[in-house]
Amino acid sequence: KSVLYIAGSLKRDDTTVPERAVLMRALRDTNMAKLSRDDVFVFMGLIKALFPNLDVPPKVNPKLNDSCRQACSERKLLRGENDIFILRCVQYAELLDVRHSVFV
C-alpha cells in the first residue's frame, strides 16, 4: 500500500517521468530504509532484474542533507562511510512521509 501511495505522489509531482521509473523509485525508496547493509545488495539485485537498463537517481533533499551535515559537525558526530548516517536520516524522513509511526 505504501509503495502505491509513494508512486502516486511521485507521479503527481512530475507527470513527465515514465511509470516504470516511478514504480522503481517507489519500490526502492520505500524498502531501502528497512534493510540491513547485507540485504541491500540482494534487494538491489532484485530491482535491477525487475527493471533492467533503468537507472533512476534517488530523490535529493539538499536542505535536509545540509542540516544533517551541520548537526554532525556541531555535535562532533561521525557521518560514517559514504555519509551513511545522512542517508539514513533522509530515508527516515521519507518513511515518516508515508507512515504514522516507525520503530527504530
Image (cartoon, rainbow, N blue to C red):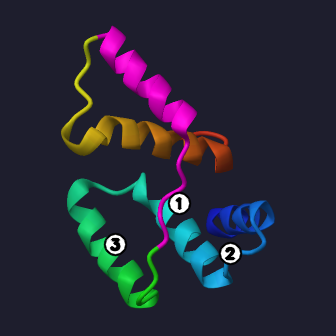
Type of secondary structure dominating the magenta stretch: helix
Badge 1 local density, few (<14 within 10 Å), some, or many (20+)?
Answer: some
Q: Is residue 51 left or right of residue 44?
A: right
Q: Amino acid at mark 2?
A: Val
Amino acid tagged 3: Phe
Q: Disc 1 designates what residue?
A: 30
91 or 74, which is in the foreground?
A: 74
Q: Is residue 67 magenta?
A: yes
* For discs 2 and 1, the disc positioned in front in the rendered view: 2
Residue 96 visible to an observer of this rendering = yes
Q: Residue at x 68, y 75 (%)?
A: 17
Please give the label number shown on residue 17. Answer: 2
Q: Which residue is mark 3?
A: 43
Q: Decide if residue 66 is on the left or right side of residue 12.
A: left
Name the quadrant containing residue 5: bottom right
Q: CA distance from mark 2 to mark 1?
A: 18 Å
- Can residue 46 be found in the magenta stretch? no
Say which residue appears at 68% left-offset and 68% top-offset.
Answer: 7
- Describe the element under mark 1 as helix, strand or loop: helix
Looking at the rendering, in which quadrant would you find the N terminus? bottom right
